[in-house]
Image (cartoon, rainbow, N blue to C red):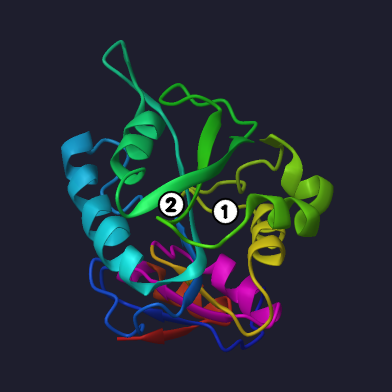
């Protein structure tokens, strides 16, 4: 994104509290949580996701809105850790209902985790977002069951690839809708959303990323 200034902003605190966002105003909540690192145990992540997705996330998303998140399974001491399945079990309940899934083929070799991630698409329980309408609007790129966009080169932040982000934002939102990234990282997704004329807000706790976030044209709010 270079140094192009956008209207996107990132708050430097945990998304366990998103008090800057009014209830029911978010059309698309995106999350790829790596706050705790890939070595953290599932119990810690479960607590984080409960606060971010089940409580605050459910509060801010509108009835016609969506939560889209991805989770990558892992290997640990000879065992396979099904993080995607565990996240699905945690979220698909009274607050959210799963309406679609994708496989993201990251096309990387990593001895600590498989080369695919599970993309989970939820709407608020009883919400109005329609998979059929999204399929019509998103057309072929959205409707592919396997998304082929490679992991961002050199990224250790589980960054959303730009082409994948673009397809999701185009399909799931309209101009002036609010897009929230609750684990913003370098905030490239928010910068993209802003250039697509969406309102864009994110949360990030790593202050070492401030310079990169600003270089992406995103305002940092302390």
The answer to whether residue 103 is above or below residue 56 is above
- Residue 9 position, x and y percent, is 46, 83
Q: How far is the residue under mark 2 from the one under mark 1?
A: 8 Å
- Residue identified by numbered label 1: 160
Left or right of 141, for residue 74: left
Left or right of 193, for residue 41: left
Left or right of 204, for residue 190: right
Q: What crowding class fits label 1: few (fewer than 14 Cα within 10 Å), some (14-19), or many (20 or more)? A: many
- Residue 1 position, x and y percent, is 67, 73
Extreme residue in the top direction: 78
The answer to whether residue 7 is above or below residue 156 is below
Extreme residue in the front direction: 126
Residue 27: in magenta span: no
Q: Which residue is at a point 66% across and 76% down the rendered structure image? A: 2
* Segment colored magenta: 183-208
Q: Which mark is residue 32?
A: 2
Q: In which quadrant of the rendered image does the C terminus lie?
A: bottom left
Look at the image and tell me whether residue 205 can be seen: no
- Residue 213 position, x and y percent, is 49, 74
- Residue 177 position, x and y percent, is 59, 80
- Name the N-terminal-most of marks 2 and 1: 2
Say what secondary structure mark 2 lies in: loop
Look at the image and tell me whether residue 127 can be seen: yes
Residue 189: in magenta span: yes
Front residue of 79/17: it is 17
Q: Quadrant of residue 15?
A: bottom left
Q: What crowding class fits label 2: few (fewer than 14 Cα within 10 Å), some (14-19), or many (20 or more)? A: many
User: Is there a contact, CB below 8 Å, between mark 2 and mark 1?
Assistant: yes
Front residue of 21/210: it is 21
Say what secondary structure mark 1 lies in: loop
Q: Which residue is at a point 40% across and 68% down the rendered structure image? A: 209
Q: Quadrant of residue 128?
A: bottom right
């Amino acid at each position: 994104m270079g140094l192009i200034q956008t209207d996107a902003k990132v708050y430097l605190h945990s998304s366990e509290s998103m008090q800057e966002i009014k209830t029911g105003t978010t059309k698309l909540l995106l999350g790829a949580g790596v706050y705790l690192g890939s070595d953290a145990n599932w119990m810690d992540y479960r607590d984080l996701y409960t606060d971010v997705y089940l409580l605050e996330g459910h509060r801010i998303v509108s009835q016609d809105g969506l939560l889209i998140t991805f989770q990558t399974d892992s290997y640990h001491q000879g065992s396979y850790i099904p993080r995607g399945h565990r996240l699905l079990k945690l979220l698909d309940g009274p607050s959210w209902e799963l309406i679609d899934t994708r496989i993201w083929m990251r096309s990387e070799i990593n001895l600590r985790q498989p080369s695919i991630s599970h993309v989970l698409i939820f709407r608020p329980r009883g919400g109005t977002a329609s998979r059929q309408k999204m399929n019509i609007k998103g057309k072929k790129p959205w409707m592919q069951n396997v998304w082929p966009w490679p992991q961002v080169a050199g990224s250790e932040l589980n960054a959303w690839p730009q082409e994948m982000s673009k397809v999701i934002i185009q399909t799931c939102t309209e101009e002036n809708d609010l897009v929230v990234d609750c684990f913003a990282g370098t905030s490239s997704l928010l910068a993209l959303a802003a250039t697509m004329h969406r309102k864009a807000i994110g949360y990030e706790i790593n202050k070492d990323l401030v310079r990169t976030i600003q270089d992406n044209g995103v305002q940092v709010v302390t």
